[in-house]
Amino acid sequence: MTELQRNFWLMMTGRSISKLGDTFHFLALSLMIYAKTGSALSVGQVMVASYLPMILLGPFLGVWIDRLDKRKLAITCELIRAGVVLSIPFLPHVYWIYTLTFVTAMVGFVSSTSQSGLVPQLFPKDQLLGYNAKIQTAMQAMAIAGPVLAGIVIGLWSYTAAFIVDSATFLYSATTLTLLSVSAKQLSKNTGAKKDRQFWKELGEGARYMVRLPRVMNATAIMFTAMITSGMFNVLLVVFSKDIIKVSDLQFGWLEAGIGVGLAAGAATLNLCKKLDLLLIVRVGILVDAIFIAVLGTTNSFYTEWLTLVMIGMFSVMAMISAATIIQTEAEQAYMGRVLGFYNTVFMAGTVGSMALAGVVETWFSVRDIFIYGGLATALATLLLSMRRLRKAESPSAATKGAEV
């Protein structure tokens, strides 16, 4: 096995097993909070605590990610996550759980961003889409199997057992990161993040640098637009399925699995799109995804809804992977953490903001109308954002330095 193949298998197994742990964590945490409080509001609050770090701290954490060795930082974060999640089921009060959920999410964000920034140091840039697609395929397969396995563990044993499995997956992830082979030359590039600069100056430099990447900015704008509709879609899907299509609890589980099937299929399909322009995949992926959301609003049966959800999952993940790959291929390592931090903050702000608005919008329009007109509006916005042909920026770092002088 070559060093390249070894790095791939280590990264793929580490991230996919860690993804399995995330599914255990999400299911066990939601069920445990509901069992302790009997309140759906409390479950919603703990979910908000999981999203807040990305929205509030994304760009700021990106500065520190750029200053440090990404592999060592990711290893440290995975070890911290292993210890923190193991303590959650033993906490005496639900507010402590909220606090540690926030900490876990923050550390997990740093780990995930560091690993995304590490990918360009492990694989050739012209092959990043293929490697990202294979890694994401494995991760999405775990996202399909994870909830089923977590339910079995919780049913046979307890919530605590699920958190123990969760902790073990992070330890495994830390081990695979330790075994990665990153050359000394690459590591030196990764650690040369101008530690003598002031924090706010580095943050501003990262923002100016990102603005000088027109394709990254366009992909970010398209993904933000898509998330405004997708956030409401995620909240209202259960209402649409249970109250309008009239599916059973078992059928709703199959609908959720259908989204997972689409995510895995989309990630696998990207292996056939290596020669296509990444920004084109983002634009077409979100356009088709939005159209299928509109189609979902017209469905009347469980089977057509399932097929539509598969297509939604498929095209949305193709766009998401391609958007991340654009950043990995076009942003320089010295700015990678900050660019990913800004991108994730914008992405999650659209998602959480639309989730918060879903209940308000539902009082004005029917769920069918929200899906149909929201999907069509997103498709139109994507078309408008895709009108201009954009080429890769030439040496944005040089442009940044010139502006400073």
Image (cartoon, rainbow, N blue to C red):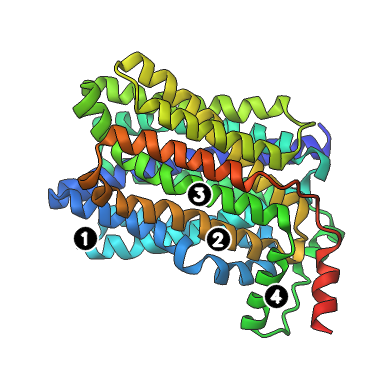
Q: In the rendered structure, which disc, 1 or 4, sits on the residue that comes first in sequence? A: 1
Question: Who's the residue at 44% across and 44% down the image?
Answer: 22
Label 1, label 2: how many angstroms apart (C-alpha)? 25 Å
Is residue 54 shown left or right of residue 41? right
Please tell me how crowded label 3 is: few (under 14), some (14-19), or many (20+) other residues with Cα within 10 Å. Answer: many
Indicate whether 17 appears above or below 243: below
**Which residue is more in the foreground, 153 or 238?**
238
Instruction: Give the distance between the C-alpha atoms of the residues marked 1 and 4, in whole angstroms.
Output: 40 Å
Q: Nearer the viewer, mark 1 or mark 4?
A: 4
Using the image as rendered, state which of residue 340 and residue 283 is in the foreground: 283
- Per the image, the residue denoted by label 1 is 94
Q: How many angstroms separate mark 2 from mark 3 (CA)?
A: 24 Å
Q: Are marks 2 and 3 in contact (CB under 8 Å)?
A: no
Image quarter of the N terminus: top right
Q: Which is nearer the eye, 282 or 265?
A: 282
The residue lying at 63 percent from left, 39 percent from top is 283
Compared with residue 156, is residue 346 higher up or lower down, i.e. above or below? Answer: below
Question: Which residue, given by chain and number where applicable, does mark 2 sit on?
Answer: 110
Mark 4, residue position? 205
Distance of mark 3 from mark 1, alpha carbons?
35 Å
Q: Nearer the viewer, mark 4 or mark 3?
A: 3
Residue 263 rendering spot, x and y as whole percentages: 52, 30
Kind of residue indicated by mark 4: Glu
Any part of residue 154 in sight: no
In the image, which disc is placed on residue 379?
none
Classify mark 2: helix, strand or loop.
helix
Q: Quadrant of residue 190?
A: bottom right
* Residue in the image at 73% along x and 33% along y: 130
